[in-house]
C-alpha cells in the first residue's frame, strides 16, 4: 500500500540519528477513494453489522437547489450515486460504508506505526504532533456522496495537537477552530516569528486551557466566489453565490435537517455569522495573487 510505504519512510527519518530541529510531514492517503485496504480491516466490520448514517428522505426539501451545482462538480459522487445505492438495497449501502470504515481503521493503524517510531526514537517528549484531515465525507447523508458540499459532514474534520509541556493528555475542547490556524500555532509553539501575511489565530491559549471560551468561527468556501459556510459554536450559516441561504442549529439539529434561514427568530444569529465572512476585496486579492503566481510559473 502507498500509505505503508510513506509511513515506513517517515519512520526511518524519525529513527535516523540527527541533532537540531526538524520538521516531518506524513500524508496518509486513505480514507480517500478508492477504498482499498488489507482484508483484515474489512473483517473488523462485518457487513451485516454496519450501521448506516442517519438519513431523512425529505432532507433536501428546504435546501436551495443551487447546492447541486457544487455537488455536481464531482459527478460520480453526487446524488446519482445515492440513487444507484438505493436501487440496490441496504446491503449495498452497508458495503460502501464498510469500505470507508475499513480505510479509516487502516489509516489509524498507519498513524499508530508513526507514533511507535516516534516513541522508539526517544524524541516523543520533544516533538509537537498535529494530526488533521483536509475534509469530511458524505456517505449518503443529504443524498450526497463525497466532499463537494458546505455542510457539517464535509467540513468537520479530526484535529489533534500534542505539544509536550503545553497540552494535557486526554483533554479536549468543544470550541470551533479552523485548520487555517495550524501555521500560526506551530510558529508560537516552536518559538518562531509569525510572518505578517499568515492568516489564522494561534491556538496556544486554547491548548493550554481547553475550557476557555474561544471567539472564532470556521469558514469554508468552495466553487464560485460567494459560496461560504460559517460554523460557529452552535450554528452553521451557508450563503451561495446567488444569495440563497441556509442556517442550522447544530446543537439541537446535528444532522442539519431543518433550514432556519427564513425564520425571523434567527435573524440576529444569521447576521452575526454572515458578518464573519471576509470582505470581497480580501478574497479577490488573494485569488489574484494565486492567478499571478500560476501565470508566472506557466511562463
Image (tube, helix red, strand yellow):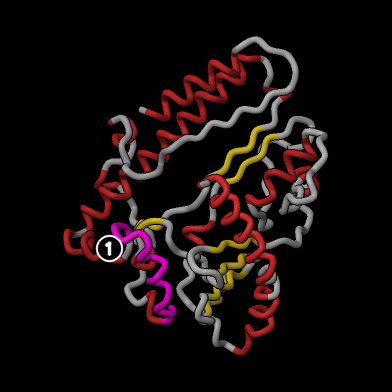
Picture quarter with the N terminus? top left
* 206 in magenta: no
The picture places residue 177, in percent across and down from the top left corner, at: 67, 55
Residue designated by label 1: 82
Residue at x-position 52% and y-position 46%: 299
Q: Residue furthest left?
A: 88
What is the tally of numbered marks visible in this picture? 1
Compared to 8, does 211 lie above or below?
Answer: below
Q: Name which quarter of the figure residue 22 lies in.
A: top right
Q: In this view, does 54 lie to the left or right of 23?
A: left
166 relative to 94, above or below: above
Residue at position x 69%, y 31% from top? 128
Element assignment for label 1? helix
Q: Nearer the viewer, residue 223 or 296?
A: 296
Q: Position of residue 186 (x, y in %)?
A: 73, 39
| Residue 233 visible in the current orientation | no
How crowded is the residue under tag 1: few (<14 C-alpha within 10 Å), some, or many (20+)? some
Residue 170 placement (x, y as % from top left): 66, 39
- Which residue is nearer to you in this view: 72 or 45? 72
Q: Find the magenta span and give its range.
A: 62-77
In the figure, is residue 258 to the left or right of 49? right
Q: Would you say 293 lies left or right of 124 here?
A: left
Amino acid at each position: 500500500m502507498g500509505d505503508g510505504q510513506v509511513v515506513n519512510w517517515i519512520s526511518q527519518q524519525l529513527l535516523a540519528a540527527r541533532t537540531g530541529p526538524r520538521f516531518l510531514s506524513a500524508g496518509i492517503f486513505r480514507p480517500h477513494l478508492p477504498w482499498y485496504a488489507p482484508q483484515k480491516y474489512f473483517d473488523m466490520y462485518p457487513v451485516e453489522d454496519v450501521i448506516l448514517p442517519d438519513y431523512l428522505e425529505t432532507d433536501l426539501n428546504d435546501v436551495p437547489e443551487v447546492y447541486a451545482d457544487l455537488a455536481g462538480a464531482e459527478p460520480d459522487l453526487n446524488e446519482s450515486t445515492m440513487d444507484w445505492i438505493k436501487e440496490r438495497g441496504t446491503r449495498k449501502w452497508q458495503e460502501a460504508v464498510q469500505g470507508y470504515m475499513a480505510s479509516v481503521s487502516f489509516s489509524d493503524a498507519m498513524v499508530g506505526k508513526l507514533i511507535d517510531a516516534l516513541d522508539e526514537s526517544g524524541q516523543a517528549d520533544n516533538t509537537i504532533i498535529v494530526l488533521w484531515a483536509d475534509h469530511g465525507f458524505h456517505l449518503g447523508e443529504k443524498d450526497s456522496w463525497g466532499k463537494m458540499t458546505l455542510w457539517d459532514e464535509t467540513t468537520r474534520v479530526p484535529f489533534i495537537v500534542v505539544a509536550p509541556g503545553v497540552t494535557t493528555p486526554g483533554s479536549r475542547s468543544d470550541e470551533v477552530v479552523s485548520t487555517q490556524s495550524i501555521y500560526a500555532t506551530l510558529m508560537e509553539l516552536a518559538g518562531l516569528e509569525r510572518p505578517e501575511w499568515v492568516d489564522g489565530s494561534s491556538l496556544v491559549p486554547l491548548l493550554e486551557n481547553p475550557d476557555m471560551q474561544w471567539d472564532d468561527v470556521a469558514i469554508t468556501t468552495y466553487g464560485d466566489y460567494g459560496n461560504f459556510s460559517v460554523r460557529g459554536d452552535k450554528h452553521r450559516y451557508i450563503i451561495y453565490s446567488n444569495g440563497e441561504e441556509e442556517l442550522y442549529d447544530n446543537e439541537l439539529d446535528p444532522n442539519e435537517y431543518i433550514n432556519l434561514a427564513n425564520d425571523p427568530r434567527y435573524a440576529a444569529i444569521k447576521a452575526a455569522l454572515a458578518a464573519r465572512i471576509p470582505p470581497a476585496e480580501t478574497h479577490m486579492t488573494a485569488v489574484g495573487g494565486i492567478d499571478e503566481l500560476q501565470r508566472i510559473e506557466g511562463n
